[in-house]
Image (spheres, grey):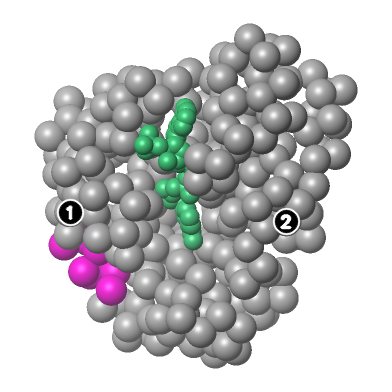
Amino acid sequence: MDKYKLNDGVEIPSIGLGTWQSEKSDAYRATLAAIACGYRHIDTAYAYENEDAVGRAVKDCALSRDQIFIGTKLPSHIKSYDGAKEYLELSLKALGTDYVDLYMIHAPWPWIAPGTDCTEGNIEAFRAMIDMKAEGKIRTVGVSNFNGEQIDSIIAATGVTPSVNQIRFFIGNTQQPIYEYCQKKGILVEAYSPLATGKMGEVDKIGEMAAKYGVSFAKICIAYCLQKGTLPLPKSVTPARIAENFEVGVVISDEDIAVLDGIKGLFPRPYRS
Ligand SMILES: NC(=O)c1ccc[n+]([C@@H]2O[C@H](COP(=O)([O-])OP(=O)(O)OC[C@H]3O[C@@H](n4cnc5c(N)ncnc54)[C@H](OP(=O)(O)O)[C@@H]3O)[C@@H](O)[C@H]2O)c1
């Protein structure tokens, strides 16, 4: 399956290129390389400071804007209606486009103050996003790093269920409570850090599984995310890896999925939801 259908009917390409920590010039080249080998979905954020480079690559590639799905994010410290409107405009300007395909609240609280109760601010920001969707500036609205309670409060206040929750999700760290909550609510989980920001290459059990299937550790990680019904966002600035990550070409057996499900507690990061 090369696309998922979101709860509002919007279709989203089932693998996206991650761009966190990609410098502008790398983000530009990586986006062009990704599109050339078949990616149709790029994940960025205002906070990554590379939206302009991603936008330039989308303009410079051989495809038209409507053939590429761009997801970006409202900075984590912006927790107001007007702030959300203002920062979307900044992202649109940087990307050089008049709409984004997916706009997400980057985190339920400012990264510098994890645990802060921003319920009202998240609701206000989300209301602005719904209005900007109605204006045609956003095709679908989502969140990132939210837990079930935080999503419930948005749904209760606005009547709109986010289409996506982008969370840290990889073998050995699948955040089961929020993963299951999203499955139940029809919210697509976007799996960020599907390679545990590259650290999965050090895990023996993943290496063994990769050897069994005759593929790289990265392909096992990405196939696992897809087989769990999530949308992996592997990041790379290396053309050969960008291609490798897209051409997954492996289906893990149910038995081996169960083995991978049994791996627990890899690379925890307790301060985020
Ligand atoms: N919403 C959020 O709060 C949030 C947080 C984190 C990430 N994200 C999103 O999710 C994306 C992915 O997460 P991530 O950046 O943490 O990392 P990741 O995709 O889990 O791993 C990226 C790292 O693995 C390396 N790598 C990539 N493909 C490889 C391959 N085939 N073989 C060996 N090494 C490989 C990359 O190196 P090279 O680049 O040098 O090739 C890079 O060091 C981000 O870029 C971002 O778009 C979102």
Task: Tell me which amino acid carries mark 2.
Answer: Gln
- Residue 85 shows in this picture: yes
Q: Earlier in the sequence, mark 2 or mark 1?
A: 1
On the rendering, which quadrant does ligand 1 occupy? top left
Residue 167: x and y, percent?
59, 56
- Residue at horizontal 59%, vertical 14%? 215
Image quadrant containing the N terminus: top right
- Cα gap from disc 2 to disc 1, whole angstroms: 32 Å
Residue sitting at x 21%, y 34%: 29
Query: Residue under circle 1?
Result: 52
Query: Quick check: is 17 in the magenta stretch?
Result: no
Magenta part of the chain: 87-93
Quarter-of-image position of residue 102: bottom left
Q: Does residue 144 sit above or below 242 in this rendering? A: below
Please give the residue where the numbered disc 2 appears in the rendered image: 175
Identify the amino acid type marked 1: Asp
Q: Quadrant of residue 132?
A: bottom left
Most extreme residue toward the top, as rendered? 214
Label 1 CA crowd tier, 10 Å (few <14, some 14–19, many 20+): some
Badge 1 element: helix
